[in-house]
Image (tube, grey):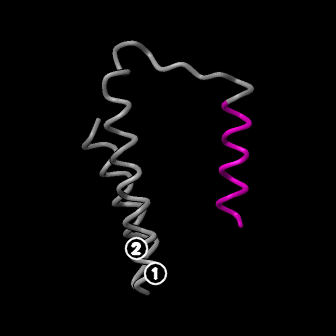
Amino acid sequence: MFAVLALLVGVVLGAIFEPSVPLVLQPYLPIAVVAALDAVFGGIRAKLDGIFDDKQFVVSFVSNVLVAG
């Protein structure tokens, strides 16, 4: 429930503030999004398998996005 609420708040804030990505970073944005989605789906799979670890998820998420960028 908390994740859905956070997603809705993020969408509303994004619609209100309309953030822009600098032109220099725009080619890397799709790669970073795919890396973030990879970490999220990996976390979902680990949760379904009963082996989810929140610390490992955060480290995986951040490292995937940083390496992709």
Q: Position of residue 60 (x, y in %)?
A: 33, 60
Q: Which residue has dot 1 on it?
A: 48
Q: Is residue 51 above or below residue 22?
A: below
Q: Is residue 15 above or below residue 66?
A: above
Query: Considering the image in quadrants, where does the C terminus appear?
Result: top left
Image point 38% across, 55% down: which residue? 61
Identity, as a three-letter code, of the amino acid under mark 1: Leu
Q: Is residue 55 left or right of residue 35?
A: right
Q: Are marks 1 and 2 in contact (CB under 8 Å)?
A: yes
The local crowd at label 2, few if under 14, some if 14 to 19, many if 20 or more residues have their Cα within 10 Å, is few
Q: Is residue 66 above or below residue 58?
A: above
**Label for residue 26?**
none
Identity, as a three-letter code, of the amino acid under mark 2: Arg
Image point 31% across, 28% down: which residue? 28
Q: How many marks?
A: 2
Q: Is residue 28 left or right of residue 52?
A: left
Magenta range is: 1-14
What kind of element bears circle 2? helix
Q: Which residue has dot 2 on it?
A: 45
Query: Considering the image in quadrants, where does the N terminus appear?
Result: bottom right
Q: Indicate the quadrant where residue 31 lies.
A: top left
Q: Position of residue 17 (x, y in %)?
A: 70, 23
Q: Position of residue 44 (x, y in %)?
A: 45, 70
Q: Is residue 3 left or right of residue 36?
A: right
Image point 68% across, 53% down: which residue? 6
Q: Is residue 35 magenta?
A: no
